[in-house]
Image (cartoon, helix red, strand yellow):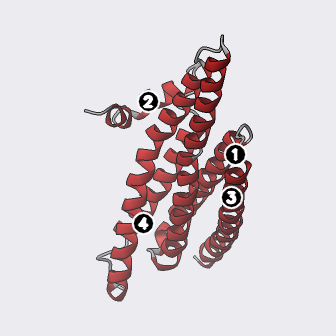
Amino acid sequence: MSPDKEKEEITLSQFLEAVAAPSPTPGGGSVSALAGSLAAALVEMVINLTTGKKGFEEKEPELQKIRVEARSCREALTGAISQDSLAYEAVMKAYLLPKKTEEEKKKRKEAIQQALKRAADPPLFTAAESLKVMQLCREAVEKGNPNTVSDAAVGALLADAALAGGIFNVLVNLSALEDKHSAERMKKELQRLGAEGESIKKAILARVKEKIDRQ
């Protein structure tokens, strides 16, 4: 069994203990990925409580598509939980490299920069994937069982937290990155993800409130 798989298969209680421990990993990036995977799971639940119900027969193909996409997002974000920790651990190892000679200092600096760039990938993935989940939440609100609208709303809030958490964890890595071209490119992508996510979240919450008020 791979180290990644072992980390994925710990219990929720063990994961929370690991987060609470005086160690940098698992940290905010891993927790953001977990939030996104929980959001996707809620979308799946909404769809599973809708399919097969009277009055939703015509929506069955759309609902099945949403469920498949939500499951794919959940699995991808679950994998990102351990990937984020592994990437940050590589950064910490790079900082611990020897720096007595000029050659060692040069190698250490290069290793740190490479590790920082790689460490930005998992949270960037989490942000992008969580935006997909938020879009699925919007579909779940519109097409799902009305009795599950609050669950879809919780999913949207979790996806929003995962998106924002991913963005912040990318930014913290970019702050020490010397490759300014790559940093600026990623910042523009983060701005796009953040703006789109905020727009979708507002639309979802307004629609949820409208649906609840009608009940």
**Total marks placed:** 4
Q: Residues within 10 Å of mark 2 (few under 14, many from 20)?
A: few
Which residue type does callout 2 highlight? Answer: Ser
> What whole-number distance in Å separates the C-alpha atoms at marks 3 and 2?
38 Å
For the question of whether residue 99 can be seen, the reply is: yes
Residue marked by disc 4: 46
> Which numbered dot is residue 179?
1
Q: Earlier in the sequence, mark 3 or mark 4?
A: 4
Q: Nearer the viewer, residue 117 or 6?
A: 117
> Which numbered dot is residue 13?
2
> What whole-number distance in Å separates the C-alpha atoms at marks 4 and 1?
43 Å
Across and down, in percent, residue 77 comes to: 45, 51
Question: Is there a contact, CB below 8 Å, between mark 3 and mark 1?
Answer: no
Q: Residues within 10 Å of mark 1 (few under 14, many from 20)?
A: few
Residue marked by disc 3: 185
Question: Is there a contact, CB below 8 Å, between mark 4 and mark 2?
Answer: no
SS at mark 3? helix
Q: Residues within 10 Å of mark 4 (few under 14, many from 20)?
A: many
Which residue type does callout 1 highlight? Answer: Asp
> Residue 46 lies in what quarter of the image?
bottom left
SS at mark 1? loop
State whether residue 174 is above or below residue 46.
above
> What whole-number distance in Å separates the C-alpha atoms at marks 4 and 2?
25 Å
- Of the two numbered discs 1 and 2 in the rendering, the one whose residue sits closer to the viewer: 1
